[in-house]
Amino acid sequence: MHSRRLEPAGGYGGRVSLSGAWEDHADEWIAWARTSSYDGFWEGTWPALRAPPGPTRSPADRPGARDSAVGLPRTRACQTGVVTDHYADGTYRWWHLSEASPELVSALGDGWLPGGGRILDVGCGLGTEVGHLAAVGWQAVGIDLSAMALARAAAGHDDAAFLRADVRALPFGADSFDAAADRGCFHYLPPAARTRYAAELRRVLRPGGRFLLRASLRAAGERNDIDEAVIVGCFARWRIDAMTRAAVPSDTRALDVLIARLTAPLRS
């Protein structure tokens, strides 16, 4: 068997083989292989979740047509060649937090996020926040581009659903979710993609749905362009219920972020 090479993003250097990543996380991969989600993942039908009745875009309207309503892209994760996967090269430890973040706990505790419903975690990583949301009564779905992160998330959180998807072309019908959260995705998007990101979230959230955004003020350790004006511009028609800068914890450091509580607008 020939191992494919996983190439870290510029600035971190080195290459990590898929076989090396397997050796580092063998127990987690084996645990996942014993779950009911394993076969569906590779068949492109995982998880068993379908969009509710109502308007949805045809495959021709979506970049990267998919095999099913929430399946993998037709080019499966197992067929991807050279990719950037920070869950293979260890970079994820920079931002990963092994417990629910204080800002999520606060949003649940003060009632801004209601007591239940369907919620989407964008850039879910290892599924910590998805698992917390499922434990407190939400029907939680996590998406990420990292197949390794999703495998580990599914192995650790069997009460939630995970799938590989691009936030710029979400594989869900309109009004599929009551809320959404993002702790690690928005600040990695190029500026030109941010409008599409906001439009896709608006499409899959019901009118009045809540969105908790944590946008890092740094990417790869360097100050980026994200500030309050960027958030206001990207979410021009949304209601901003609160927006503040804070230092939030990861397992290894404090991260400077912009925390925004947003409410999706009504349909025009």
Image (tube, helix red, strand yellow):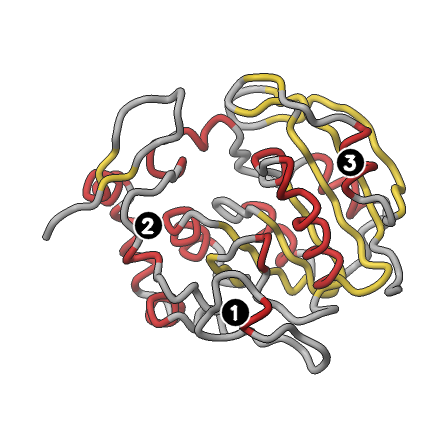
The residue that label 1 is drawn on is: 70
Say few, some or many: other residues with alpha carbon within 10 Å of mark 3 (under 14 / 14 to 19 / 20 or more): many
| Picture coordinates of residue 128, whole percent (x, y) | 55, 45
The residue that label 2 is drawn on is: 28
Do labels 2 and 1 touch, CB within 8 Å?
no
Q: Is residue 144 left or right of residue 246?
A: left
Under circle 3, the secondary element is helix
Q: Which label's residue is closer to the chain start, 2 or 1?
A: 2
| Picture coordinates of residue 176, whole percent (x, y) | 70, 69
Q: Which label's residue is closer to the chain start, 3 or 1?
A: 1
Residue placed farthest to the left in the image?
A: 1
Distance between the Cα atoms at labels 3 and 1? 28 Å
The residue that label 3 is drawn on is: 231
Q: Is residue 120 left or right of residue 83?
A: right
Q: Quadrant of residue 59?
A: bottom right
Residue placed farthest to the bottom in the image?
A: 53
| Picture coordinates of residue 266, whole percent (x, y) | 89, 62
Kind of residue sitting beneath label 1: Val
Q: Quadrant of residue 42?
A: bottom left
Given this view, does label 2 or label 3 mark the residue nearer the observer?
3
